Image: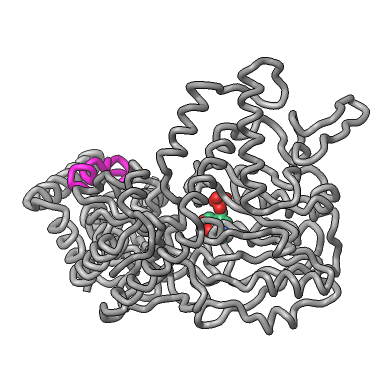
Amino acid sequence: MKQKRTNSLSNIKVIQEEIVEEFEMFDDWMQRYEYMIELGKSLPLIDEQYKTEENIIKGCQSKVWVHADMQDGKVVFTADSDAIITKGIIAILIRVFSNQEPQAILDANTDFIDEIGLKEHLSPTRANGLVSMIKQLKMYALAYQTKVN
Amino acid sequence: MELSNLDIEKIRADFPILSRKVNGHPLVYFDNAATSQTPKAVIDAIVEYYEGYNANIHRGVHSLSQEATDAYEEARETIRAHFNAQKKEEIIFTSGTTHGINLVANGFASELKTGDEVIVSALEHHSNIVPWQMLCEKTGAQLKVIPMTESGELDIEAFEDLLNKNTKLVFVNHVSNALGTVNPIQKIITDAHQKGAAVLIDGAQAAPHIKADVQALDVDFYVVSGHKMCGPTGVGVLYGKEEWLNKLPPYQGGGEMIDQVTFEKTTYAGLPHKFEAGTPNICGGIAFGKAIDYLNEIGFETIAAYEHELLTYATAQLLEIEGVKIYGTSKEKTAVISFNIEGIHPYDIGTIIDKLGIAVRTGHHCAQPIMDYYKIPGTVRASFSFYNTKEEIDAFVQAVKRAKIMLS
Ligand SMILES: Cc1ncc(COP(=O)(O)O)c(C=O)c1O
């Protein structure tokens, strides 16, 4: 069990490094944002039944819905937003955190967001809710982790 | 386009911040409805205060305290003259519009009872809604709402129907922050008075553009914020008719607002000190006075004419972009454009154009009922000031076009 957990955490790190590398290819903000918009557009659709008031993350200027499921010991996230840049950010977060074990999600840090030049979105006052989003993902992970134990 | 008689180069030089760059682009500041920028004259007043005569007021015997008191009271007089209040005692320094509204709402707790009615409008900032909801909860009074129309104006006929002998208080803004609509406050005040109701006007958005004469309006309360009028943050003014201010109980207790304190009974100071508990924002008050002097030197008519030209120009330019919809199309408008582009979230547009150095506001602008009316999550709001230019509008329109291409 311990071994597996470490795997999931290092898995998260690998994905984060991949993303950092991808973003390093861009010279300017324009390309970065264009890429994020692309990511946003390609985000798999969330099942409409999960777009409920209950699943809305508070503190976002745009609406963000997150739904979590547990499959084979891993947390699977789906999410959506009505703003495309926010969707891009969600897509990045889902790529990192979805399909990981709850403990790994709880242990992972989010420094890579700074590294890919999206630090400004991390400001809690920015009201795009990236911080609330990460918090929410970790809350789900914690809930599942508690259930597992 | 020949813009009206305003020396824009000279005016822009008065605002140090306007020469800075943001994200590698010259700053285009179109978030003036949220907070205006600060001219050198006001910044200098702040520096002079802290370097020259920083001291507590009204109670010191020493020279610095006297100088600070004189400057603070002089600012009060400047503000009185500006709004043409009858007496200096009717000018209460506050921390801003929100504080002023809460002060009055708190005071009315002892004036209202179950069965009484108060009237708000659908166009209000949350600051002019929530304190009154709290008051209604406390007193059992009922909150009635003047509806708005598609063009973002108040339905004045509906207002007439809401007014009755139970109406005790009406509170509406002079200008809507989300849409820029100038409301017919003279009519609202006159009609409310006919039914014996008092009127509070939230002048936060009007004060930077329109010089209100509180005596001519015969308004009972008028509230403004310094930071929207080229003054500093954390200071504002509540104008109240003397008879009302005498009648309402103090808002906060503390130093400055007392006459005599014993543990048996405390008597309160006279106006305006009764409502100014604690050490006020002395420097802020003084600087606010300077800001008003600065605006008056340019002249409110000149400001309004110039800003109107900016508004007309920007509206025409924006409407050339396909899919743009402007919210708030009243004939009487300040220089505010609230808009969306079909199929694009306002947040996305704001984020992209910020990268191009352009500061606008996106979201519900603390006026969720308006957004609910239009069934939209929010808008992009560009709000202009007399120090903005047509060239900046061009840069803004280009940026919006670029954002639209990226986001479509
Ligand atoms: C119409 C209106 N009322 C009230 C306020 C609140 O002002 P302050 O935050 O300065 O208290 C604002 C500020 O945005 C406003 O636009």
* The C terminus of chain B, quarter of image: bottom left
Q: Is residue B271 above or below residue A101?
A: above
Q: Is B10 part of what is drawn in magenta?
A: no
Q: Is residue B250 above or below residue B156?
A: above
Q: Residue at x 33, y 72 (%)?
A: B313
In front: B368, or B279?
Answer: B279
Q: Is residue A72 visible?
A: no
**Ligand 1 in which quarter:** bottom right
Residue furthest front in the image: B5
* Residue A50 in picture, x, y percent from top left: 39, 70
Q: Is A113 part of what is drawn in magenta?
A: yes
**Magenta residues?**
A102-117
* Residue B285 in picture, x, y percent from top left: 59, 38
Q: Is residue B385 visible?
A: yes
Q: Residue at x 33, y 48 (%)?
A: B10
Q: Is residue B296 above or below residue B206?
A: above
